[in-house]
Amino acid sequence: MKSKLLFLLLLLGSSYITAQTVIENPPFETRQGSIHTISKIELSPTETRLTIRTVFRPQWWTSLDSLTYIYVPESKKQLYPLRIEGRKFGEQVTTPASGIIEDDCVITYPPLPEGTTRIDWMDDNLNSETNTYGILLVKPQETKEQASLRKIHGNWQQADAQNGWDIGIYDSLAIMDNRFWKYDLCRKQGKKFKLNLKDETGEQCLLEITQEKDGNLCIGKNGGKANKYIRAGRPQRNYAATTAATAPQTAFFRKDTVHIRGFLDGYSPKLGFTTVLIYTDNHITNEGTPAVVTIHPDGRFESDFVVNYPGVHHLSMGNNWMTFYIRPGETLMLYINWEDHLDYLRQRRLKPMLTETLYMGPSSSINQELMPCEPLFSKDYHIIQNACKTLTPSEFKTQQEPMYKLWMHRVDSLEQSKTLQPEAMQMLKNDVMINYGAWLLEFILMRDMDARKDTTNTILKIKETPDYYDFLKAMPLNDVRSIGCNNFSTFINRIEFMNPFLPASWQIKNGTDDRMEKYAESWRKKKEILQDTTGMPFPVVGELILTRSYPFLAKTLENEKKAFALLDTLKGYLHDPFLVAEAERMYRQVYPVQGNKPQELPAGKGTDIIRKLTAPYLGKFVIIDFWATSCGPCRASIEQHADLRKEYRNSPDIKFIFVTSNQDSPEKAYENYVEKHLKEETIFRLPQSDYNYLRELFHFNGIPRYVLLDRDGKLLDENFPMYNIELFLKESKIRKE
């Protein structure tokens, strides 16, 4: 009897040892990428097995690293792989046409510590697309209220309305009426779920929600009549009864603050960033200023910045750019799904757009209507690169005409469908035309660059004829609404430097000071050339070209009275009072009323960061070099001025410091470059979120950028010309003659 009992106990013990827990498609908190997904976890007392499913852009290769480890937050242990099945570590596996590698692989790790409830799957690179955080191994306990809230989680729109997105219900907050709301009380009463909401001002709202059998909701607000809500998507509107777009009824130019608010669904601070950037452009003066978007731990984000006209701006998140349209003074609420963002990145832009982005606010319908149109008018830059050395300008133009006809056919079809409101339709039409115009101008610009490098190519020696530019006659050059279009920045830049303007370039004779007359004559010629080329009176685009050139020309005059006289000349070309006011603002920016005195840095996060970096060098002039390992001109300047920095390394008068970000300068590339070129220098590699605040503080989009602080830490020049460093050293009496 005892032997039988002992055998039974041994059998039970053996069963315990060999028993394992299998978790299919384990939920997780967030992740850095979606190429590799854990589809199954097998837990046993002897090992931990992760089944990995790989999905990537078709015909691209991917691999798994042997240093990919399991991190156990509760015990702070790192577990490294024991073996891999179905693949080799470091093996480059190419995805098939479907993008899905059919055979999953299994990575085996040591057993997890007893009591482990969640793990992270990590790579040594903290920005790796492998990193997955908060993988749950046990089902979390939840109340009835939490379970009910989970069922109605998501975005909702009123069934009989065409708003697109009316209410968002999430784990820690709600979005409604273009505002954030916190849950004051959640309770279940029979079939009804009651949400007491409170916004940032203290205003309260009661939502009474009933979920129907089909999954849709009936929602009543503050005791009012309940309306039916369905999952939010893109409503199909019909503007058949609406008249065609006309010129703006109110002043197009208007300076006011816009307010961007939103929710990044799936965000966690574990992703390693707390800010992103919005790129804002003032096309009137060619000023580009980044605005920091602050992201809160619960996924809310916000940004406020000033605009001068209705138009498109760009939100940059990692390697993804998202466009949005907004008018001065408006608030626009955005819903962005992090997994949708990762899907876009995983497909390496093969996916045309973020499909789950939603908008709320006065401009929401325009954004909803324009977003799906963007992929219809895409270009392949490989075409233009290959054509530069093989086609003459007339041949390239002929080759591209079918593309333009297809684009305009699509525009006509959209216009006939009446699914875009007139304002959106006119904006789309303008953007498509200037997109094509920029494409033809880009070809000539790139071709001329190739011709300077390759002097033997006979095709490159064939110049464009004047009729190449006939396409400009069809461009919306006199429609101010074009200024707010997505492609306008590239378009006007290419016009500014197009070859027909070469006869209007100015040259200063040695030993003379005839700049003022030369600049005025150049403007007069540009007006004539643009009128002759386009066949129309001097258009708004021409006025912008002259206005954008004024700040540089005024600065080179080095004389306030002459700059003011040049301003008067410019005003003679401008018809809109707002453009005149912007030109006057640029004059005062070059020649401030108080003179070029040092300025106190404004209070804020960016100033706090820069003060901390430069505090040890008070009493010296400080030149801050914003750079990156990926920036060729940055590296060239650093290496060019190496001897000068060595000469002043221990100077009591001047200090050079170098600032980059962990995103722009990956760790290994950064360490290698510093070891070779910046070993003796003062360098800072900041988290990208901190670096973003400095970009906003000093108003720069591109690098290299040089900022000059005086001995008291005040701002002398936020765009210091490093090529004039020797002149500065002499004028400030740092260099002793």
Image (tube, rainbow, N blue to C red):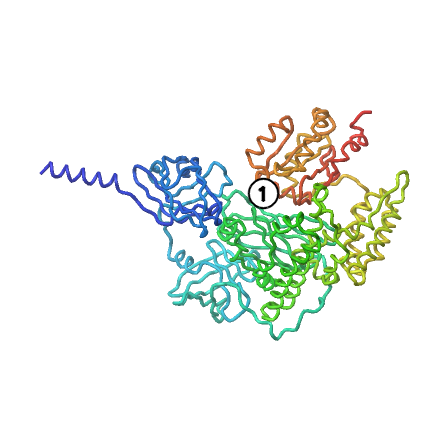
On screen, residue 241 versus residue 283, left or right, reads left
Seen in the picture, residue 363 relative to 318 is either above or below; the reply is below
Residue 225 x/y as whole percent: 48, 71
Residue at 50% x, 58% y is: 174
On screen, residue 651 versus residue 666, left or right, reads right
The picture quadrant where one finds residue 622 is top right
Q: Amino acid at mark 1?
A: Ser
* Furthest-left residue in this view: 1
Please state which of residues 683 and 429 is positioned toward the viewer in this rendering. Answer: 429
Residue 685 x/y as whole percent: 59, 35
On screen, residue 6 versus residue 174, left or right, reads left
Quarter of the image for the N terminus: give it.
Answer: top left
Q: Residues within 10 Å of mark 1 (few under 14, many from 20)?
A: many
Quarter of the image for the C terminus: give it.
Answer: top right
Residue under pointer 1: 689
Residue 703 x/y as whole percent: 67, 41
* Furthest-right residue in this view: 512
Please state which of residues 236 and 91 is positioned toward the viewer in this rendering. Answer: 91
Marker count (numbered): 1
Please state which of residues 719 and 269 is positioned toward the viewer in this rendering. Answer: 719
The picture quadrant where one finds residue 678 is top right
Residue 471 x/y as whole percent: 72, 60
Residue at 36% x, 40% y is: 85
Q: Secondary structure at mark 1?
A: helix
